[in-house]
């Protein structure tokens, strides 16, 4: 979690961060009564989220520092709460309640959506390049329950994300993934059957040996 305050930190650091991440901006002005009321709740939220693993930034920017901001937008009133993604303004400001609970929930929703999109894009890039052997290794390393849940959730997310793309592109991508996944699942099933058969043979062999030993002992008596 990235926290920025224009009164303490350099604007150049914020410009570098905003170009590659999602940032929620709080534009404040000196002498504004509403801004002064918002400051204690904002400081409380930043202290709560500072050490969290959320993927995003929270920036408190004074209107006097707007000239040093690389990614600019027109601000008509203060306080203004805006979302920037990769340096681009989202065109929708937060107009809800400025209470602690509502603001915190708004921020958590923004960062969770960002995390979901980033993980999905990473997974898609990873599995486009992966072949059946790499997928086998991945499945073997992960636990059975985790891998099953992963593939189910991934397939749903992938289908939702590809709806925005053209049908041809989404079909091609999904065919590649589905064929690889089906091959992996079949090979995993075959491997399970083989291991079961081997275990059954071992049990039978051990049982036969035990019977022979019992017979030999009974004959001696």
Image (cartoon, rainbow, N blue to C red):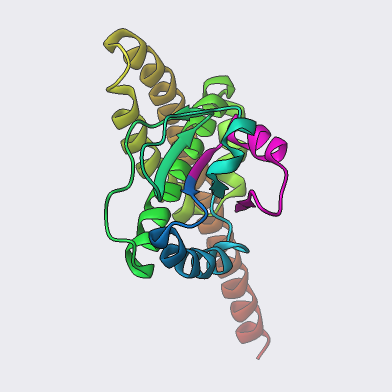
Work out which quarter of the rendered image holds the C terminus and state it: bottom right
The range drawn in magenta is: 1-24
Question: Extreme top residue here?
Answer: 168
Q: Give the total number of marks visible in the rendering.
A: 0
Q: Does the magenta stretch include residue 192?
A: no
Q: Nearer the viewer, residue 103 or 125?
A: 103
Q: Where is residue 160 in the image (x, y as percent from the top left)?
A: 29, 31
Q: Is residue 20 visible?
A: no
Question: Extreme bottom residue here?
Answer: 221
The residue that appears at 29% across and 21% down in the rendered structure is: 164
The residue that appears at 60% across and 67% down in the rendered structure is: 206
Q: Is residue 15 visible?
A: yes
Vertical placement of 35 versus 84: above or below? below
Vertical placement of 22 versus 141: above or below? above
Q: Nearer the viewer, residue 14 or 180?
A: 14
Q: Where is residue 99 in the image (x, y as percent from the top left)?
A: 34, 67
The residue that appears at 56% across and 33% down in the rendered structure is: 135
Q: In this view, does 188 lie to the left or right of 50?
A: left
Vertical placement of 216 versus 152: above or below? below
Q: Which of 134 and 164 is in front in this view?
A: 164
Q: Is residue 12 left or right of residue 18?
A: right
Vertical placement of 113 versus 121: above or below? below
Q: Position of residue 31 (x, y in %)?
A: 48, 57
Q: Position of residue 147 (x, y in %)?
A: 47, 48
């Amino acid at each position: 979690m990235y926290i920025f305050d224009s009164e303490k930190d350099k604007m150049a650091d914020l410009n570098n961060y905003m170009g590659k991440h999602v940032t929620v901006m709080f534009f404040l002005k000196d002498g504004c009564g509403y801004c002064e009321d918002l400051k204690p709740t904002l400081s409380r939220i930043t202290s709560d989220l500072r050490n969290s693993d959320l993927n995003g930034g929270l920036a408190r920017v004074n209107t006097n520092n707007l000239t040093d901001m690389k990614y600019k937008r027109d601000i008509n009133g203060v306080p203004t709460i805006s979302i920037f993604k990769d340096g681009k303004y989202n065109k929708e400001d937060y107009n809800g309640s400025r209470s602690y609970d509502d603001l915190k929930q708004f921020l958590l929703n923004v960062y969770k959506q960002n995390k979901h999109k980033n993980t999905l894009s990473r997974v898609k890039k990873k599995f486009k390049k992966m072949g059946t052997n790499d997928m086998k290794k991945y499945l073997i390393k992960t636990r059975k329950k985790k891998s099953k849940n992963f593939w189910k959730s991934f397939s749903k997310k992938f289908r939702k994300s590809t709806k925005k793309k053209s049908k041809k592109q989404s079909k091609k991508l999904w065919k590649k993934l589905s064929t690889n996944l089906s091959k992996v699942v079949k090979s995993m099933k075959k491997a399970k059957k083989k291991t079961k058969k081997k275990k059954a043979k071992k049990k039978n062999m051990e049982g036969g040996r035990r019977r022979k030993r019992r017979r030999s002992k009974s004959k001696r008596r």
